Image (cartoon, coloured by chain):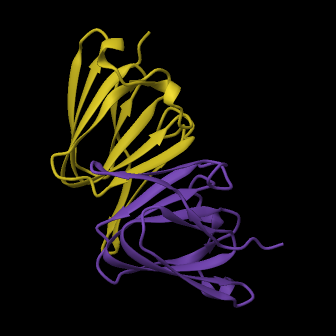
Chain colours: A yellow, B purple
């Protein structure tokens, strides 16, 4: 059974001192967080991604700007998302090919279920 | 034995597509990450913090702009830090009173060793 992508809404506490968003593992996302990564100073209209994971799961959050995400299953199903709110997250299951377009000084925060391993990446579209 | 604050440097992979920074729990930081939070749209020169944790540990990262951090121990020791690089993190142990000044559209990413619990906070300076 292939898992499906899912949009999450996180708790946000907004007041005059700024916006605080947070998530707790297992409560807000369906795996234990083993790795946290963030992307900054990504050029306008830059495309990133272009790979799938064999077993690794991710939740990505656009904490500034906007990110257009395209996910494709091995069966050719194609899902698109616009992430442009810091309290929204996208769950990306294994075996979905992901591509992301960065706009408006976008910054991405990612949470991963595993430590980094090149072996977990499928980078060649033909292999997918 | 009171634990002491510590500055960490994380791995950064910088190229023409932007900067990727990441950390892995236990390898890069000394606790399992139970909660991740982020602050955005914090007004210029806003002060946040103003509390200590009884047992919770944190690592904070300034992923945009600059954050001036002041930590104070119960013995009155005072440490100051300027966080202004997305690949630097500050470990804040329990029982250090923290205050943060946000500058230059600063965004803060925080990783915590525990789920949110108001009981873990010391918010009254006199109690500290």
In this view, which residue lies farthest toward the right?
Answer: B1
User: Residue A67 at what x, y percent from top left?
Assistant: 22, 44
The residue located at (46%, 42%) in the rendering is A111
Residue A92 can be seen, yes or no: yes
In the figure, is residue B20 to the left or right of B93?
Answer: left
In this view, which residue lies farthest toward the bottom?
Answer: B76
- Please state, as top left, top right, bottom left or bottom right, where the C terminus of chain A lies in the image: top left
Q: Is residue A86 above or below residue A53?
A: below
Q: Quadrant of residue A9?
A: top left
Residue A24 can be seen, yes or no: no
In the figure, is residue A27 to the left or right of B91?
Answer: left
User: Residue A2 at what x, y percent from top left?
Assistant: 41, 13
Q: Nearer the viewer, residue B89 or B40?
A: B89
Q: Is residue B15 above or below residue A19?
A: above
User: Residue A14 at what x, y percent from top left?
Assistant: 33, 64
- Please state, as top left, top right, bottom left or bottom right, where the N terminus of chain A lies in the image: top left
The residue located at (28%, 58%) in the rendering is A41
User: Residue B36 at what x, y percent from top left?
Assistant: 49, 52
């Amino acid at each position: 059974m292939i898992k499906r992508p899912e949009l999450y809404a996180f708790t946000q506490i907004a007041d005059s001192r700024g916006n605080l968003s947070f998530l707790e593992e297992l409560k807000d996302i369906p795996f234990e967080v083993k790795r946290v990564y963030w992307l900054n100073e990504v050029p306008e209209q830059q495309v990133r991604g272009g790979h799938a994971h064999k077993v690794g799961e991710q939740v990505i959050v656009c904490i500034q700007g906007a990110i257009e995400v395209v996910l494709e299953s091995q069966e050719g199903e194609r899902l698109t998302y616009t992430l442009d709110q810091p309290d929204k997250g996208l769950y990306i299951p294994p075996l979905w090919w992901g591509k992301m377009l960065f706009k408006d000084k976008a910054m991405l925060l990612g949470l991963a279920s595993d430590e980094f391993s090149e072996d977990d990446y499928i980078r060649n579209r033909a292999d997918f």
